[in-house]
Image (tube, rainbow, N blue to C red):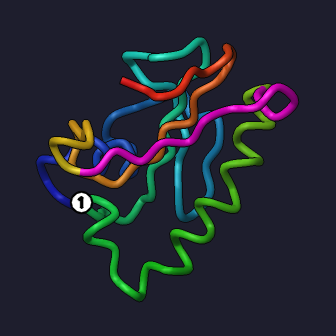
Amino acid sequence: MQQDCIFCKIAAKTIPVNAVYEDEYLIAFPDIKPAAPVHLLVIPKKHIDNILEAAPEDTALLGHILATIPKIATIAGLAEDGFRTVINTKDNGGQTVYHLHFHVLGGKFMTWPPG
C-alpha cells in the first residue's frame, strides 16, 4: 500500500465506497466525477502506478480484472446495450490518480473519438 494513494486507502477500507463488486483482487465502485450515466472505477487492490508499471508477475491479476469487467458491467446493467472500458496512462493519457484503474462507462451511446 502506498500511504498517500487514495485508491490504496479505498482498497484497505480506510476510505469507504459503495462497492458494486469486490473480490480478493479488485474492487469496483462509482466514480465521484462521472463522465457517463454509469461510470465505475475498477481498481486492483495491489498498487501499480499505471499499465506501464505492470510487471510480468501481474499478468494473472490483469487477466482477472479483464475477465471480471463483463460481470461488473452486467451487475451495473450495461451488458445488454454495451459499454466502454478505458485505461488512462500518465498525464497525456488523462491519468489523475497514479494507481492503475479501469473506467467502465455506459448508459448512453458513446461517440468516437473521445476527448
Q: Is residue 87 magenta?
A: yes
Left of 60 or right of it: where is 97?
A: left
3 in relation to 40, above or below: below
* Residue pictured at 49% horizontal, 38% vertical: 103
66 in relation to 9, above or below: below
2 in relation to 86, above or below: below
In percent of width and height, residue 66 lies at 62, 60
Our reading of the magenta stretch's main secondary structure is: loop
Front residue of this view, candidates 95 and 72: 95
Disc 1 packing (10 Å; few <14; some 14–19; many ≥20): some
- Residue type at mark 1: give it: Asp
Viewport quadrant of the N terminus:
bottom left
Extreme residue toward the bottom, this view: 56
Extreme residue toward the left, this view: 4
Magenta range: 78-89
The image quarter in which residue 9 lies: top left
* Residue pictured at 61% horizontal, 19% vertical: 38
In percent of width and height, residue 73 lies at 72, 37
The image quarter in which residue 110 lies: top right
Identify the residue position indicated by label 1 in the image: 49
Q: Is residue 5 magenta?
A: no
In percent of width and height, residue 100 lies at 34, 54
* Residue pictured at 64% horizontal, 24% vertical: 106
Viewport quadrant of the C terminus:
top left
Identify the secondary structure beneath mark 1. Answer: loop
Front residue of this view, candidates 48 and 27: 48
In percent of width and height, residue 88 lies at 34, 44
